[in-house]
Amino acid sequence: MSTDITTSQRPTPPSYEVPKVYRYGALIVGFFALVIFPLVFNNPTISTIGVFAMIFLMAVTGWNIFSGYTGYIALGHAVFFGIGQYATAMLSSYWHINPGMWTFVLIPVSMILAGIAAIPIGFMILRVRKHTFIVLTIALMFIFQLFAYNLRSWTGGSQGLEVGQPGWDGSVFNLPYYYVGLFVAIIAIITSFMIRRSKFGLSLLAIRDDEDRARSLGINTTRSKLIAFIISAVFLGAAGCIYAMFVGSVYPQFSFDPAFDLELSIMAFAGGLGTILGPSLGALIISAAQQYFLISFGGANVFLIVYGALFIVILRLLPGGVVPAISDKWRSHVVRKEQRKLDAEIQGPAEGGAKK
Amino acid sequence: MTLLGVNNISKSYGGIQALRECTMNFQEGAINGLIGPNGSGKTTLFNVMTGYETPDSGTVTFRGNDITNATPDEVFASGIGRTFQLTRIFPRLTVIENVHIAAQRQGFLAQLRQWSQPDERARALESLDFVGLTKLSREPAGSLSYGQQKLLEFAFIMVAEPKVMLLDEPAGGVNPTLLKHLGGRIKELNKSGVTFIIVEHDMEFVMGICDQVSVMHQGHALLEGKPDIVRNDPAVLEAYLGTDMSEAE
């Protein structure tokens, strides 16, 4: 293939990305803010909000790896959240794990079990698309809830299961959960980042835009979707494990809760579906706000009204989510800057000529 | 030498017979035109040849191998690329990302590498240079004009280096300047050994660019020959205008 343009002559298009110095700067500031948060706000009520925020942070990042990147909106990922919870409750009892730091060993076990469960589930439900897929995921979540209710000898049925709580002092009780949660959430974010930068990630985005076209260009769409689904489930399993350890009990209606996936999707949409950091930002804002409103206005479910109003405000002002809104602003800034440069180049010689 | 052939292909949708025992051979190294009135079965034939539709009967062969029941990805992997009547790009990805997608035919481990490898990026940019879209490489593909989207689709098929390119109405909705540009690129690629099969209604474009033209009418092959012969054939005129021209006169 021959071209008219050599590499040196090639026109360089302007970069619309926010410069690395700002992006990495924001990441470093964000990271340190999350690290010192429970040390600065050591009130147990506030650090409890922090623990839930970390759980949602890893869960929504995992959810976004599948639903955000492929465009398959899954509303049944509570299945893997629930599997993580029940695995923790059942195995801590079965293996006689003393409540304490050793319980955290169950996180990788829950991740593996959720990942294994995702294989047959993925094979079944990834054969369908769009609305049918959404309906199937919801149905599957209710099937698992029924399992949890009816397999009483394993799950305790509606009585649920207890997870032993360590006897740590109240002032530091939340810290291990918070930091372990932060650690797993960072792994989830790094995984999401690596996927987005890989050829695999690009194939997922191609599936989101036009799956048939992606397939016709040689992408193994079934394999790509299934792998993303499994990775996604793995982080939901971890979230379920930490949740069960922190809350100390597991019940079918809370482990396999239809509202859970709605919360995940709201967080992802608010932050920016399909972006790397958008869902994380959404999780931090929405989950913290949710917990705060629950504590402040919990009495007559007023918190739900406040929570709903916040969501409407975000969608109204930033329909694509927070991160895409920032990207758009930056893009407009670059375009205006380029235009000013171009205007100056056009006007410069003209003014010079006029002076002569 | 025949590179891609269809033998007695039939395909119907309910009561509509889109293809009826259609037999055609497309020569290696040529720019083949495929013309015919609306509804004559050209796009259906493209769909059958590229694995998007399974024929009711008949066979499709590529380099002597039967590819009748191959899936679209298998057809693409064998070296047959195609564009669509209505462009099918990835609108929310950037132009350069679109071009990279066509270079994804690798095992899973290779897929874990960063998508923008220097050698592949160079190839992708070369492909964009070829169609004149380099300046727009960082724009979302959905923001391009229709004509530019046609060129982009052409570029991302090209980057996969297919042996045959099937272009479905490349001139549709493209302005004359871009069309001239596209025609030049087709000829240039053809010189480097790529075979083309072009479905098109723009007769000036087809007759100006093609070495061989096949005509379809009511789902079967009506005629094959050099553009000059096809242009003046009464049967072709009748197929297009629906009347015998000599009788009309």
Image (cartoon, coloured by chain):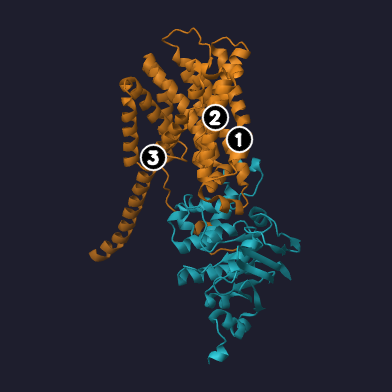
Chain colours: A orange, B cyan
C-alpha gap between disc 2 and disc 3: 26 Å
State the residue position of label 1.
Answer: A121
**Which residue occupies 34% across, 41% down?**
A318
Q: Classify residue B182 as left or right of residue B12.
A: left
Query: In terms of sequence position, does the residue under pointer 1 or pointer 2 come before the other?
Result: 2
The answer, for residue A272, to whether it is visible in the render is yes
Disc 1 chain ID = A
Q: Is A153 situated above or below B16? A: above
- Check contact, mark 3 vs mark 1: CB within 8 A: no
Q: Nearer the viewer, residue A25 or A151?
A: A151
State the residue position of label 3.
Answer: A321
Disc 3 chain ID = A
Q: Nearer the viewer, residue B177 or A149?
A: A149
Label 3 sits on a secondary structure element that is: loop
Residue type, mark 2 in image: Val
Please provide percent x and percent y for residue B96. 51, 52
Do pointers 2 and 3 mark residues of a single chain?
yes
Please provide percent x and percent y for residue A104. 56, 17
Q: Residues within 10 Å of mark 3 (few under 14, many from 20)?
A: many
Residue type, mark 1 in image: Ile
Foreground label between 3 and 1: 1
State the residue position of label 2.
Answer: A79
* Quadrant location, the N terminus of chain A: bottom right
- Check contact, mark 2 vs mark 3: CB within 8 A: no
Residue type, mark 3 in image: Gly
**Which residue occupies 32% across, 30% down?**
A305
Please provide percent x and percent y for residue B162. 64, 60
Query: In terms of sequence position, does the residue under pointer 2 or pointer 3 come before the other?
Result: 2
Please provide percent x and percent y for residue A219. 61, 49
C-alpha gap between disc 3 and disc 1: 30 Å
C-alpha gap between disc 1 and disc 2: 10 Å
Label 2 sits on a secondary structure element that is: helix
